[in-house]
Amino acid sequence: MLAYLDHHATTPCDPAVVAAMAPWWSDQFANPASRLYRPALEAAAAVEHVTALLRQGLGAAAASQVVFTSGATEANNLALKGLAEAALASGNPRRRFVSVVSEHHAVLDVLHYLERHGFGLTVLPVDGQGLVDPAALAAALEPDVLAVSVMAANNEIGTIAPLTALAPLVHSAGAVLHVDAAQAVGHIPLAMGALGIDLLSLSGHKFYGPKGIGALLVAPGVPLAPQLHGGGQQGGLRAGTLPVPLIVGLAAALELAIADHAARAMRLAVLRDQLWEGLQAIGGFSLNGPPPGPSRLPHNLNVTALGVEGNRLHQLLRRQIAISSGSACSQGSPSHVLAALGRSRLEAAATLRFGLGRGTTAAEIEQALQAVGDAMQTLRHPTG
């Protein structure tokens, strides 16, 4: 049986989440915007309940706006393009964004788009563990900086950003802090207000919720221009009929994830460390990202197999374990994250990203080690 160890790409929808969504597909199906009869009012009340739950669960201010989106990609677009267009409309002279070279393409591609339309962009390097230097950020915060975008946790190498050190620098410069938290929400403690996050993006399917739903949490006073126009739903920030079943599923997934994330993190960190120890015993692997500890997601391991051909390695593994070499959004291109760490294209191709999950067992870790060991033996000592 295939061992699924690619939980950074997506997670299975928890059965309890599926059950929570079930009535809203066909029994309680009313449009929450049609508030002239009871079923629609019940749907609207469900959405309002989820909105309050997201604020509370993610430590956002009571006046924060929750905008439901199709996922973190759309949330990132709304956050960054929305900031840019709002600045233009208000006459705000700030015209520069600052981000990090290892950000997800859902952020970097948006910022390069804005760059082509007249906004400035500064992209900061990372060190060998994928961490941005707070001093480098401070130096980049010129008076023209509108916003800084830093992901909470890297989707490839598991690096957790030092937001407590970065946020005060951003705010002291009068800029806005956007955080892509797709890989962090539901996995590590994350309190939007305490960390000084102004805009937070998330995706439900990264923490055992349904695909097709996410959210952007907007701190009070942060101006955004809508990117979808139409019926004026969600305070005019995102037009379109709300997908109530998915919204209910998002809330159920977040409640479950918050409830078990501490115990889950401890258990998966033990399995992750056993996996790393086993790979070291096989030999020929180099760790990418921080060492296991507080700067790394507890369910993440990213290693490069040295001296072997990457495509062949993955071919040998794919029938026994589901893993990847990098982001599911890279479409086969070499990882820009690994390149930022100094890895070559060949090394990036021979990289294994392990994402452990709620259902991962010790037997699957042993299965993965056996599969990797056999593959490395085949590649190092080919016959014929």
Image: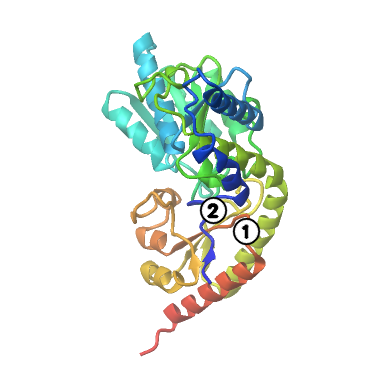
Residue 153, by quadrant, is top right
In three-dimensional space, the C-alpha distance between marks 2 and 1, rounded to whole angstroms, equals 9 Å
Indicate left or right for 168 with 241 as reference.
Answer: right
The circle on residue 359 is: 1
Picture quadrant of residue 325? bottom left
- Residue 25, given in percent of the width and then of the height, sits at 50, 40
Badge 1 element? loop
The residue at 50%/51% (across/down) is: 10
| Residue 133 x %, y % | 53, 37
Q: Residue at x 54, y 61 (%)?
A: 5
Task: Relative to 96, say whether 136 is above or below.
Answer: below
Tag 2 residue = 12
Tell me if residue 257 comes above or below residue 68 in the rendering.
below
| Rendering quarter of residue 94 | top left
Residue at image coords 68%, 46%: 261
Circles 2 and 1 in contact, beta carbons < 8 Å: yes
**Dot 2 amino acid type:** Pro
Hey, what amino acid is under mark 1? Gly
Q: Is residue 356 visible?
A: yes
Q: Residues within 10 Å of mark 1 (few under 14, many from 20)?
A: few
Count of marks placed on residues: 2
Say left or right for 145 vs 18: left
- The x, y position of residue 247, in whole percent, is 53, 35
| Secondary-structure class at tag 2 | loop
Task: Please state, as top left, top right, bottom left or bottom right, where the C terminus lies in the image.
Answer: bottom left
Q: Which residue appears farthest toward the bottom when viewing the image?
A: 384
103 or 28: nearer the viewer: 28
Name the foreground residue: 35 vs 183. Answer: 35
Measuring 54% from the left and 53% from the top, which residue is drawn there?
12
